[in-house]
Amino acid sequence: MEIIYLNKFEDSRINIDNLSLVLGNFDGVHIGHSQLISFAKSMTQEGNLAVLTFDKSLKANSNSYLTNLNTKIKLMEKLGVDYLLIVKVSEKFRKISYVDFVNKVLKVINPIKIFCGPDFKYGYNALGDVSFLKERFSEVYVLNYVTDHFGNKISSSSIKELLIKGDIKDANRWLGREYLISGKIVHGKGNGKKFGFPTANLECDEKYVIPKNGVYITKCVINGLKFNSITNIGINPTIDDSGVKSIETHIINFNNDLYGQHIDLIFLDKIRDEIKFDDIDSLKERVKVDIEEAIHYFDYNKFKNN
């Protein structure tokens, strides 16, 4: 897959012959996005398939993301995209009219086919819609959105809501994979180590959607190696009254120093909500139970997959 960053849309590098183009922000690259791209691929027997997306949200006040750009790129490559066209979003670009988006972006790329969802919007204040695309291009294919078992649309927003509620299983189901956040291990307060459960404190490298406060079964990827782990998200109400939220991961049977290391944290399942215990001893006993539950989870899934 070739990646092309778009700053100036008259750049000759984007003159690709016989090009089919899929449009979208693709935050999360969830199963709805995958279905749209797979459909476009099936309709592109000859020629090249490209996806046009953005390096950041088109909304200046966007609060959080499901994927950073590196993860989005990796997922697009897995889907068999030939070209990934990434618009570098600036304040100027955020104010481009929907007419200019078509004339100065899409017309310059010059696709023979365009694919998008029925609610694809573009241009300043999202005034551009599918109808205008159909007026300007001869072949525009609109694939209806994927729905859940209740008939609700699967979208980046709906997956964010699931994560905020702590519903990891359904979020992962509609993503089509386990939810992942990335960042650097930084120094924390060291409480976990004092209690016999050393933790790695994650400082995220993007404004990710952070799941609801609670304890989760996770995996960590460090230097390409995967480790079983358990992660607490929350304010540690039993031992800390600062109200500061943290993401602390205990890697099972692992005691190496990880400060400064980059880590990918993969969410598999939820054990429980965050609880304020009566005392430190009660907290320690519950953490032991949580770790045992995680170990059973990994043992069961290892047996199931053999």
Image: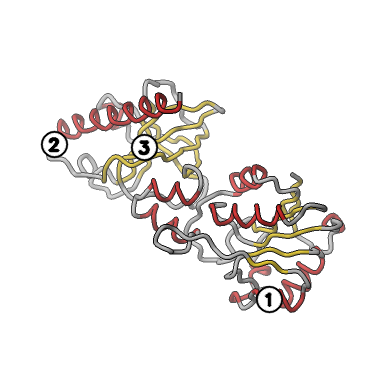
Q: Which residue carries the number 3 mark?
A: 248
Using the image, tell me which numbered label, if any, was put on residue 279: 2
Q: Which residue carries the number 1 mark?
A: 98
Three-letter amino acid code at disc 1? Tyr
Judge from the rendering whether residue 74 lies leftward or rightward of residue 198; answer left or right: right
- The residue lying toward the viewer, choosing from 176 and 236, is 176
Three-letter amino acid code at disc 2? Asp
User: Which numbered disc, 3 or 2, marks the residue that appears first in the sequence?
Assistant: 3
- The part of the image, by quadrant, that contains residue 6 is bottom right
Q: Please tell me whether mark 1 sits on a helix, a strand or a loop.
A: helix
Three-letter amino acid code at disc 3? Glu
Residue 28 place in picture, x, y as percent: 54, 52
Using the image, tell me which numbered label, if any, was put on residue 253: none
Q: Residue at x 29, y 39 (%)?
A: 271
C-alpha separation, residue under disc 2 versus residue under disc 1: 59 Å
Judge from the rendering whether residue 150 lies leftward or rightward of residue 54; answer left or right: left
Nearer mark to the viewer, of 2 and 1? 1
